[in-house]
């Protein structure tokens, strides 16, 4: 199993109110979680197309 480290959005400035999602790659898929919940957060598994759609939707907000 190949898993990368969790990465937080570059839009997160490190302030207490800047919690956001984190993402990592695992075996050809992507996982996302809520950064403020950390290890307690549910993890959502997304395929490449789903992850790309998530990023595209977030960019429009």
Image (cartoon, helix red, strand yellow):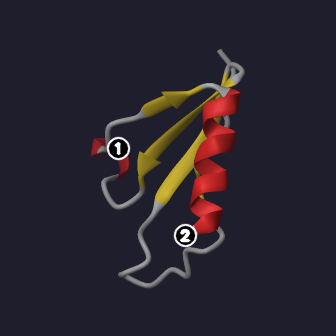
- Residue 47 to residue 56: above or below: above
State the residue position of label 1.
39
Closest to the camera, between mark 2 and mark 1, is 2
State how far apart marks 2 and 1 are (Cα). 27 Å
- Residue at 70% from the left image edge and 29% from the top image edge: 48
Please tell me in which quadrant of the rendered image residue 51 appears.
top right
Please tell me in which quadrant of the rendered image residue 27 appears.
top right
Q: Give the mark nearest the N terminus, 2 or 1.
A: 1
Residue 37 point in image, percent of width and height: 30, 54
Quadrant of the drawing holding the N terminus = top right
State the residue position of label 2.
61
- Residue at 43% from the left image edge and 45% from the top image edge: 33
Point out the residue furthest to the top here: 1
Q: Is residue 9 visible?
A: no
- Residue 9 to residue 42: above or below: below
Residue 60 point in image, percent of width and height: 62, 66
């Amino acid at each position: 199993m190949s898993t990368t480290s969790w990465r937080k959005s570059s839009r997160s400035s490190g302030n207490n109110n800047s919690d956001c999602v984190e993402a990592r790659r695992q075996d050809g898929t992507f996982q996302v979680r809520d950064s403020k919940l950390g290890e307690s957060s549910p993890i959502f598994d997304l395929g490449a197309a789903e992850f790309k759609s998530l990023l595209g939707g977030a960019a429009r907000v």
